Amino acid sequence: MPRSVRTLAALTAVGLLTACAEQGGSAGGDAAAYPSEEIRLLVPYAAGGPTDLTARAYGTSLEEQLGQTVVVENLPGGSGALATQELIGAAPDGYTLSLVTAGTLVLTPLANEVGYSKDDVTPIGVMSEVPSVLAVGADSPYQAAADFFTAAEQQPGVLTVGVPGASTPQGIELRRLSEEYGVEVTAVPFNGNAEMTTALLGGNVDAVLINASSDVTANIDGGQFRPLAVSSEERLSWLPDTPTLVESGFPELTLSGSTFGLAGPAGMPEEVVTVLEDALRTAHDDPAVVEQVGEEYIDEEFRGADELQQVLDRTQEVYEPLLG
């Protein structure tokens, strides 16, 4: 090889190495400086429900800690698929995040062709845990769970139950109610608690299987809703007179509660995940967040990225044989 060609090749190689080093240094610097601009926080359900309340409470705390505006954006639709597709299509730089649930990340992909799976996100941590309650309106003829389920057995498919999406834990549990226990009701999907509440109060559905968040307990306390059963394995301390679905004769139906987590797109830098996980941990103990979300919905111990991943993996393990 002539000397001039060797010299040109060497200079080209040095130039490439320098460019790569500068590019790597820039990426590392960007991660180290995170965040330096506005953060989007997507919510896969309509405004006014528990997901919206949780996202806004945590978003305010994150904004104060990180020193950047956190814009909460509701993108309801497709049992959470619309917001999740927006999330996974974003750059994995920490500037687009989303509230996620096992329903949006596991059940919806198992039940529908949505173009993503739980492996397309980066878990950051758990924000809150909300059980579900089967409730009817104040003027409903069903005074207790036994009355409702007896009527459902006598009139298969006639009674309608609102759920926050067909492939949510609530929607799938109603399928299990039919397939495993022979009690058939018709699930009617809505985009979150606010729509479900309007439908129940308007007499458009016979009952709802709904997240028992503060908006729902306010309706229970006010006499607009009558709770028939809760999804937790044991009775709730704040609804002590309401039996569980287990007590009502359905021992397997304990999975319709919702774990609300925070996640970003797959491939986020570890440094960014660490910043967000630490901020989420601080928000978890923030008295303002606890008051807004409700002490009963926030675990005593913070659960981070690994624990949120375990929730998703466990849900996949249970429901994949049913839906896969």
Image (cartoon, grey):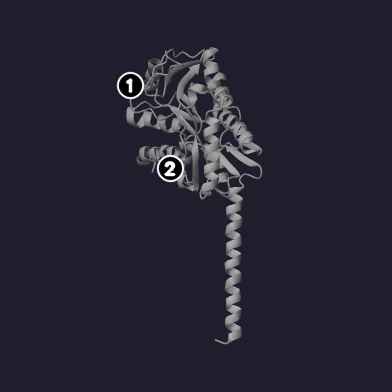
Asked where in the image residue 158 lies, by quadrant, the reply is top left
Asked where in the image residue 202 lies, by quadrant, the reply is top right
The residue that disc 2 covers is 110
Query: Which quadrant would the C terminus be assigned to in this image?
Result: top left
Image x and y of residue 88, in percent: 54, 47
Q: CA distance from mark 2 to mark 1?
A: 27 Å
Image x and y of residue 150, in percent: 37, 18
Q: Is residue 90 visible?
A: no
Graded by Cα atoms within 10 Å as few (under 14), some (14 to 19) or many (20 or more), the crowding at tag 1 reads few
The residue closer to the viewer here, 92 or 273, is 273
**Disc nearer the start of the sequence (2/1):** 2
Asked where in the image residue 4 lies, by quadrant, the reply is bottom right
Image x and y of residue 87, in percent: 56, 44
Q: Amino acid at mark 1?
A: Gly
Q: Is residue 123 visible?
A: yes
What numbered label is drawn on residue 249?
Answer: 1
Please give the name of the residue rendered at 59% of the width and 29% of the height, measured from the top-left corner.
57
Give the structural element (helix, strand or loop) at label 1: loop
Give the structural element (helix, strand or loop) at label 2: helix
The answer to whether 314 appears left or right of 219 in the picture is left
Q: Amino acid at mark 2?
A: Leu
The residue closer to the viewer here, 96 or 199, is 96
Image x and y of residue 302, in percent: 47, 32
In the rendered view, would you say 126 is above or below 200? below
The residue closer to the viewer here, 241 or 143, is 241
- Numbered circles on residues, count: 2
The answer to whether 250 appears left or right of 13 in the picture is left
What numbered label is drawn on residue 323?
Answer: none
Q: Residue furthest bottom?
A: 2
Query: Which quadrant would the N terminus be assigned to in this image?
Result: bottom right
Graded by Cα atoms within 10 Å as few (under 14), some (14 to 19) or many (20 or more), the crowding at tag 2 reads many
